[in-house]
Image (cartoon, rainbow, N blue to C red):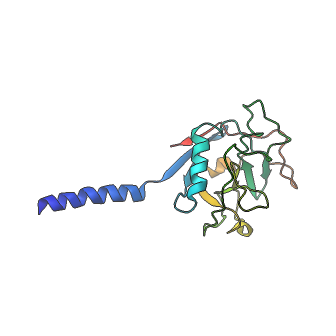
Amino acid sequence: MKKFFYLFIIIFSLVSTKIMAKDIMILKLTYGDVEIELYPEKAPNHVKRFKELANSGRYDGVVFHRVIDGFMAQTGDVKFGNSNNPDFNLSLAGTGGSELPNLKAEFTDVAHTRGILSAARSADPDSANSQFFICFQAAPHLDRQYSAFGKVIKGMDLIDKIKKGDPNSGAVANPDKIISLKSK
């Protein structure tokens, strides 16, 4: 009987650890470190892509090319928006992506509230690739229209410090950039 009890405890510990384990990323900005929790159960393909690009260093040096005060900060153009690469072109930042194929939409019940990470895309719902944005405040008009896949859980005050762009277009003349983005 004791064997079964100990076996139960071991299995319960393994299962509860898996259930309670969080998928956390660290976004380093000049202002400090931001912790982001990812939602693989909600948007598995977007989380997989985000982690693949982040952990391979593709987001390191990428600028926040479109930042609209009170709305969102957009980044993630690894082709034209990476200030560490020879293809960097601020006037084209926001028009590129990665060499990987675009992702199919993964619309979920995750509301676009303050701190939510969501996939940027064109008018085609299945055109998300590498770009993403972080909401400064609730944007319910984006719910079930964009693939939300994570949330800032620590350091939202640092996201608030990101340089804002033109009030109409969001274009940022001298943008902040991602120093690094990696799994915790």
How many numbered circles are shown?
0
Q: Can you give x and y, in whole percent of width and height, for residue 129 in the image?
A: 69, 51
Q: Nearer the viewer, residue 112 or 14?
A: 14
Q: Can residue 153 be seen in this view?
A: no
- 164 to 179, vertically: above or below: below
Q: Can residue 107 be seen in this view?
A: yes
Q: In which quarter of the image is the N terminus?
A: bottom left
Residue ranking furthest to the left: 1
Q: Can you give x and y, in whole percent of width and height, for residue 171 in the image?
A: 84, 47
Q: Can you give x and y, in whole percent of width and height, for residue 158 in the image?
A: 66, 46
Q: Which of 109 and 100 is in front in this view?
A: 100
Horizontal placement of 10 versus 171: left or right? left
Which of the 4 image quarters holds residue 82? top right
Which of the 4 image quarters holds residue 134? bottom right
Horizontal placement of 104 versus 94: left or right? left
Q: Can you give x and y, in whole percent of width and height, for residue 177 in the image?
A: 72, 39
Residue in view at x 76 percent, y 58 percent = 70
Residue in view at x 61 percent, y 55 percent = 46
Horizontal placement of 154 versus 123: left or right? left
Residue in view at x 12 percent, y 60 percent = 2
- 84 to 63, vertically: above or below: above
- 176 to 21, vertically: above or below: above
Q: Nearer the viewer, residue 51 or 177?
A: 51
Residue ranking furthest to the front: 101
